[in-house]
Image (tube, rainbow, N blue to C red):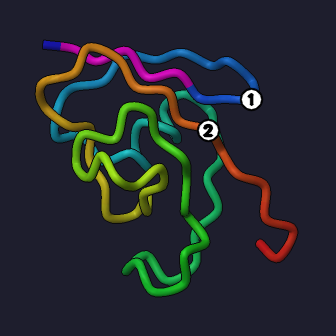
Amino acid sequence: MTVSIRFLPDNVVVNAKAGEPLLEVAARAGVHISTGCLMGSCHACEVEVEPNIADPSEESVLACLTAVPKGVDHLDINLMADPTW
């Protein structure tokens, strides 16, 4: 099953497989997500995901630690601009 991933605000759409790392999906789509430590400590890769089935109480995830979830047919990923990165 493929998942349609839409990167906002540029509205770039790409298909991905469940379990595929978000950073790899973004790179394949030509979308840049800032990274720092690649271990989740620095939060440089924080993005907003809708729907966030990993934790419905949270709107954001760390792209370096997150994979495309099973059980959804689409995800909207809003790239948050952080001038620090």
Left or right: 8 in relation to 14: right
Asked if residue 78 is among those painted magenta in the image, a careful observer would answer no
Q: Which residues are magenta?
A: 2-6
Numbered disc 2: secondary structure = strand
Q: Residue at x 26, y 52 (%)?
A: 55
Badge 2 density bin: few <14, some 14–19, many ≥20, Cα 10 Å: some
On screen, 27 above or below 11? below
* Mark-to-mark CA distance, 1 and 2: 6 Å
Q: Secondary structure at mark 1?
A: loop
> Where does residue 43 sit, x and y in percent of width and height?
54, 75
The tag on residue 78 is 2
Q: Which residue is mark 1?
A: 9
Q: Are marks 1 and 2 in contact (CB under 8 Å)?
A: yes
Above or below — where is 73 with respect to 42?
Answer: above
Mark 1 Cα shell of 10 Å, populated few (<14), some (14-19), many (≥20)? few
Numbered badge on residue 73? none
Q: Return the x and y of residue 25 as percentages of the image width and height.
A: 41, 36
Residue drawn at (74%, 29%), measured in percent from left and top?
9
Q: Residue 30 location in percent, x, y? A: 62, 32
Q: 41 above or below 50? A: below
Q: What is the x, y in percent for residue 3?
A: 28, 18
Q: Amino acid at mark 2?
A: Asn
Quadrant of the snapshot with the C terminus: bottom right
Q: Earlier in the sequence, mark 1 or mark 2?
A: 1
Kindly identify the amino acid type of the residue bearing the numbered disc 1.
Pro
Q: Looking at the image, which residue is at 53% across and 35% down? A: 77
> Residue 22 falls in which quadrant of the image?
top left
The kind of secondary structure the magenta stretch mainly shows is strand
Residue in view at x 55 percent, y 62 percent? 46
- Which residue is at the far front? 57
Which quadrant would the N terminus be assigned to in this image? Answer: top left
Q: Is residue 3 magenta?
A: yes
